[in-house]
Image: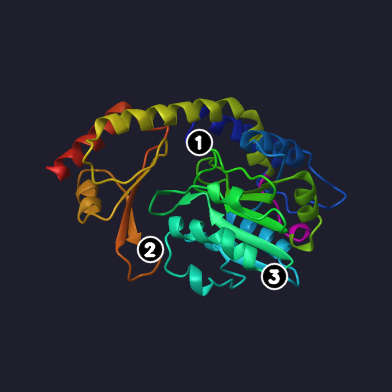
């Protein structure tokens, strides 16, 4: 989106109106209505009841965790949960959670929640595996005991605008996300029911933090048609690229998702030598095997995807 011509033109107009930033508290008596206007549209876009924007995806996660922490609260962390939901609060994995993959964790979480005596139970997860792509099945939410006070928090930074986020029945559900990936806007969003979003908005941690750039939110509201257009282009590019690569490709991916990963050696260097840059770094620690990750976007042309597919085929042979 940051390179979409119409989006950039709308941003230039919005900058003229709003300037570079808005330093006031969102709870000040002097307010810009673009925040509420954009949050209504973001909630519709995400198919959630209400939205609240903040300065970053990291802060969205930290703000939600701080809001949920009470005297008798128990946190459970799914494998690969983003640091936005645990790092600054020093939340720790339970012994039974350590070393499990996502599937194994989901088979145990409902029973562990039943055994938990805490008044408030918070379960945190990412919406999709990252940086190594992995499909997460959220059927486990429907197995949770209805008698418990449960909140499920999902960081959807790597799926927002691309894949539909999971839904829940019988539990409070909160989505946090960066808007700086698929959406092309520096900022973050919290999505939940209206009461939860209203309560977070009244918290001191929200009131005391600087908000998103208003010009970006004005640009978003005026560019909704462009987002729909680019979503369609991205879906077409994914379908086209998947048809071009062989069934025995060494790339791992999931349905209708633009990220492809591998731990095969020399892929990053080979593609770099041929004019294609991928992400490649050890994760989650410096001693892990490097993950090579390539991303398709709506900006890619068919000739770009043809070139990439041809180079990948050469590596298979």
Against 102, is 168 above or below? above
Which of 264 and 184 lies nearest the eye of the viewer? Answer: 264
Q: Earlier in the sequence, mark 1 or mark 2?
A: 1
Q: Earlier in the sequence, mark 3 or mark 2?
A: 3
Which residue lies at the image location 76% right of the left edge and 51% below the top edge?
Answer: 196
> Label 1, label 2: how many angstroms apart (C-alpha)?
27 Å
Which of 226 and 117 lies nearest the eye of the viewer? Answer: 117
> Label 1, label 3: how many angstroms apart (C-alpha)?
46 Å
Q: Quadrant of the C terminus?
A: top left
Q: Which residue is mark 2?
A: 283
Against 195, is 183 above or below? above
Tell me where residue 225 appears, x and y as whole percent: 58, 25
Against 165, is 244 above or below? above
Tell me where residue 126 appears, x and y as whole percent: 52, 53
Q: Earlier in the sequence, mark 1 or mark 3?
A: 1
Q: Which residue is mark 1?
A: 1
Tell me where residue 127 appears, x and y as whole percent: 52, 49
Q: Which residue is mark 3?
A: 117
One can see residue 231 in this view = yes
**In magenta segment, residue 219:** no
Residue range in magenta is 206-213
Count residues near mark 3 (Cα–Cα under 10 Å), then give few for <14, some for 14-19, many for 20+. few
């Amino acid at each position: 989106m940051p390179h979409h011509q119409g989006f950039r033109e709308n941003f230039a107009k919005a900058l003229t109106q709003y300037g570079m930033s808005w330093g006031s508290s969102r709870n000040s008596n002097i307010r810009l209505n673009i925040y509420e206007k954009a949050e209504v549209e973001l909630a519709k876009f995400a198919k959630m009841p209400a939205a609240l924007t903040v300065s970053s995806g990291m802060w969205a996660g930290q703000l939600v965790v701080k809001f949920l922490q009470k005297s008798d609260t128990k946190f459970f962390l799914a494998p690969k949960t983003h640091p936005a939901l645990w790092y600054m609060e020093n939340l720790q994995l339970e012994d039974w959670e350590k070393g499990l993959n996502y599937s194994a964790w989901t088979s145990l979480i409902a029973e562990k929640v039943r055994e938990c005596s805490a008044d408030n139970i918070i379960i945190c997860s990412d919406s999709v595996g990252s940086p190594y792509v992995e499909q997460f099945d959220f059927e486990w939410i429907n197995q949770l005991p209805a008698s418990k006070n449960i909140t499920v928090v999902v960081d959807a930074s790597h799926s927002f605008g691309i894949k539909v986020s999971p839904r829940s029945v019988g539990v409070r559900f909160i989505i946090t996300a960066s808007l700086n990936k698929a959406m092309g806007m520096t900022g973050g969003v919290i999505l939940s029911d209206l009461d939860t979003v209203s309560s977070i908005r009244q918290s001191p941690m929200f009131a005391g933090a600087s908000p998103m750039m208003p010009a970006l939110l004005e640009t978003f509201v005026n560019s909704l048609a462009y987002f729909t257009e680019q979503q369609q282009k991205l879906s077409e590019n994914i379908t086209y690229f998947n048809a071009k690569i062989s069934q025995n490709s060494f790339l791992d991916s999931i349905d209708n998702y633009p990220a492809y990963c591998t731990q095969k050696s020399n892929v990053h260097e080979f593609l770099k030598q041929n004019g294609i840059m991928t992400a490649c770094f050890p994760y989650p620690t410096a001693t892990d095997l490097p993950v090579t990750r390539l991303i398709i976007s709506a900006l890619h042309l068919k000739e770009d995807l043809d070139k990439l597919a041809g180079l990948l085929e050469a590596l298979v042979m």
